Amino acid sequence: MRLMLNEGVRARRVLLIGAGDGGRLVLNEINKNKSLKLKAVGFLDDNKRKIGRKILGINVLGSIGELPVLAKKHSVDEAIICIPSASGVLIRKIILLCEEAGIDYRIVPGVYDMLLRESKELPARAVSIYDLLRREPVEADIAPIRKRFSGKSMLVTGGAGSIGSELCRQLARIKPRILAILDKDENGIFELKNELSGSGTRIIPLVVDMRDYGKIERLFARYNFQVVFHAAAHKHVSLMEEDDNIEEAVKNNVLVTRNLLRLCESHDAEEVVLISTDKAVNPTSIMGVTKRICELLFQSMASKKTNFVGVRFGNVLDSNGSVIPIFRKQILAGGPVTVTHPEVKRFFMTIPEAVQLIIQAASLAKGGEIFVLDMGEQVKIIELANDMIRLSGYEPGKDIKIKFTGLKKGEKLYEELFYEREQPRFIYKNNILALKPDRITQRKLNKDIDVLLSEMDPGKIKKKLRAIVPEYKAD
C-alpha cells in the first residue's frame, strides 16, 4: 500500500540539479515514497542537449546558472544536488545560487551508496578532502624524481604518521633499493609494511626511539642511507604548550634532529629533507619555535657535502590531529562543530600535495634552502566548518550548530609562510618557492642548543628558546 500525503500538508516543490543517473534515482525515490512530501518540478543540467527534454515525465528546465530565475518562476522550496561526482567548487556555486534564490538545498551521496541504502530519507553526502581545498591540487612531475632517486637507500623517520606513511607509499613507487620506515608506533609500521609488501621495493621496518643515538648510528652503518626524510616530531600545538610536555618537545624535536643531521653528515648521506611547518615563522608555540630551530640546524650545515633542505607546510587536510577528522566526528554526532575563533585562518594542503612537495624539494635541493608550496589564500576555519556541514547535506546554524571555544595556548589567528628577509622566489612551475637561507654560525647555534637542552624548568626553557629565535613570542 502506497503512503499518501497527510491531508492539508503541501509537498515541498524541489528542483533536481543534475539530469543524469543520480537525478533519475532521486526522482524515482520521490515518486515511490510519498511520505517524503516532495514534488519534483523539474531538472537543471548544464548539458545543452538535455535541456527541453523530459526524463521520467519531468522537464529539464534549463542550466544550473538559471536556478534563481527558475526557482522563482516555479515556486521552488528546495534544490536537491544529484551529481555524485560534483566537485566542491561546483557544489559551492550551486549553494550560492540557492542562497541567492532564498531556497533550501541538500546533497545526495554517490549513486552506489544510494542503491544500497534502505532508509527513506535522503542521506548525507561523504565529503571529499578535495571539496575543501578551494583551489586545484598541485601535482609534481614524478619522472625526474624517479630518475634521480631510483635505486637509492632511503630512510623515512616518523614513517607511521599521516605524512610519513603517505611519503613511504609514494617513495615505494620510485623503486628505491631499500625503504626503511622508522617509528615508535609498532602497529602503524606493521600495517604499512603489509600494505607495501607487494610494491617490489625492499621494506625495512624499524621500531626505534630516535633518541637512542647508538641504535640509529648502527642502522646508518648497516644500511648506508643515501636519502633521508625527517618527518618525526611532536606536532600537536596545544598539547606541547603544557608545562609537563615542553621539555619533551624540545628533546624530541631539537635534540633528535641535531643527532640525525650529525649522523647523515658522518655517513655521507646525499640528501636530507626536514619536514617543517609555517608555524616556524614568527612562532608563538613550543611546536613552532622548536621546528624553527630545526630549520636553523639544517641551514647551519648548508656548506656541507650533504644537501640539507627544509620544506614548510601549511595545515595538512585530514592528517592526524587536524580539524577535518574532528569536524567529521562532530557532524556525524549532530554537532556542535567547535571552532576556536571566528577570524582564525590557515593555509591548507592535501597529504598527497605535501608529500609530493617533500620529494620534489629533495630533487631540487642545492643545500640550505627551505621550500614552500604556494597554497593560495588562507582559509577561515569557520568557512571550512560551514563547507563541511553544507557538503554533508546540512545547513550550518540550523541542522548543525557552530560553537566558538576561544584560541588555545600557542595558537595564532593566522599563519605566515616566510620571513621578509627570506626573499621568496618561484623556482618550479610557479607553485614552489625557494627561500633565501639565513646565515647561521654552526658553533654558536650548537652552544645555545646545549644550554637549552640542559634546562628542565618550563620558564627557563622558553627564555632559552627566545634567545635562539628572537621572533618567538610565548604567552
Image: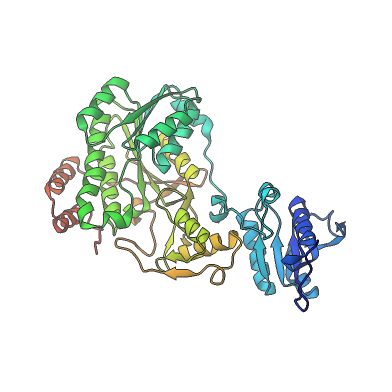
Quadrant in the picture for residue 345: bottom left
- 125 with respect to 424 (left or right): right
Question: In front: 144, or 380?
Answer: 380
Q: How many marks?
A: 0
- 396 with respect to 46 (left or right): left
Quadrant in the picture for residue 237: bottom left
Q: Quadrant of the N terminus?
A: bottom right
Q: Tell me, what colour scheme is on the image?
A: rainbow
- The picture places residue 157, in percent across and down from the top left corner, at 34, 35
- The picture places residue 362, in percent across and down from the top left corner, at 40, 35
Most extreme residue toward the front, as rendered?
Answer: 1
Q: Quadrant of the C terminus?
A: bottom left
- 160 with respect to 262 (left or right): right
- Identified at 47% across, 55% down, the residue is 324
Q: Is there any visible trace of residue 363 in the rendered image?
A: no
Question: In front: 429, or 193?
Answer: 193
Q: Is there any visible trace of residue 189 in the rendered image?
A: yes
- The picture places residue 155, in percent across and down from the top left corner, at 36, 30
Most extreme residue toward the bottom, as rendered?
Answer: 8
- The picture places residue 268, in percent across and down from the top left corner, at 28, 25
